[in-house]
Image (spheres, coloured by chain):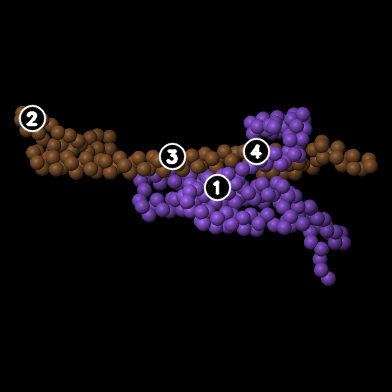
Chain colours: A purple, B brown
Amino acid sequence: MLSPQDIRQLITKANKGNEQALDTLCATVEDTAPLWKQFNMPTQALESLLKAFFGPDALLTHEAQRRQCAALRRELEGPAPTPIERLLVSRIVLCWLHLYCVEAIYGHGIEQGLSITQHDFHQRRLSQAQSRYLAAIRTLSQVRRLQAPAVQVNIAREQVNVAAIAPAQPQKG
Amino acid sequence: MGWEQRGTKGYYYRSVRHGSHVTRTYIASGTFGMLAAELDAEKRAEREAKAETWRQARADMEALDAQITDWWDNSSILVNAWLLAHGYYRHDRGPWRKRAVPPRHTAAHHQGEQGQ
């Protein structure tokens, strides 16, 4: 099993034109199940976040948040998500919850009164959480756009190229 | 802050920082001095307790953020590896793009399909 560092090195080599590295990378990502277990641990991160923010004993709140995250995941994934879409959506959901927690902690701190250093700390934390959340959304949007088949419609001599966002649905009637 | 002993009598002074320099102000001597010293000690203890609470809260938040960052970095590696292996690329940290020519393993796969 390759470690994250190994895969990072393979990515760097493949980006520099090393075909052997690209082959190894392709073979590695083909078998996604163990990789996901190793890399994609949103459940662990989610549980840590819930315990840290709501306290270890707020079981009902934990469950409510889990359900809210699951609903958001279902909404973003759509009816037939690809493996990469599932991974990207799990990133968005966790980043959304993290951002929510960071904002709430900062808001509570403002009510209590904060020093300039404390404001600065919270602002930096908030900026990082926001940029991660937006980056996660951006990547999903890019991947969805690239996965969509480009549909070419020929009308007489005029050609119109349309990049469909969702897979083409059969028209009724 | 502290007591200054002159002869048999003690005089209580309070030190206050104004920017880069510190000024010492005389407060009182005897019983009033002791009272002021006790009040100052209480305020100092309260400030230290607040600072310790903040240090602890900050350490907790940083530990949680480190865990989230770790997860984010690892999942980014997986996303990048998957996209790269499926014919996507990024130029100079720009947006992801799809290669006009599919990667070798995809091309070989298609050739195999055509040959059958």
Q: Secondary structure under badge 2? A: strand
Residue at left offset 79%, top offset 38%: B103
Q: Splitting the image into 4 quarters, where does residue A116 fall? A: top left
Q: Amino acid at mark 1?
A: Glu
Q: Which residue is mark 3?
A: B59
Q: Give the letter of the chain under mark 1.
A: A
> Where in the figure is residue A139, as x and y percent of width and height?
65, 47
The residue beneath circle 4 is A38
- Residue B73 on image: x %, y %: 60, 39
Residue topped by disc 1: A47
Q: Which residue is mark 2?
A: B6
Amino acid, disc 2: Arg
Residues indicated by labels 3 and 1 sit on the same polypeptide chain: no
Q: Residue at x 42, y 41 (%)?
A: B58
**Label 1 crowd (10 A; few <14 / some 14-19 / many >=20):** some
Q: Nearer the viewer, residue A154 or A80?
A: A80
The local crowd at label 2, few if under 14, some if 14 to 19, many if 20 or more residues have their Cα within 10 Å, is few
Q: Position of residue B101 (x, y in %)?
A: 81, 40
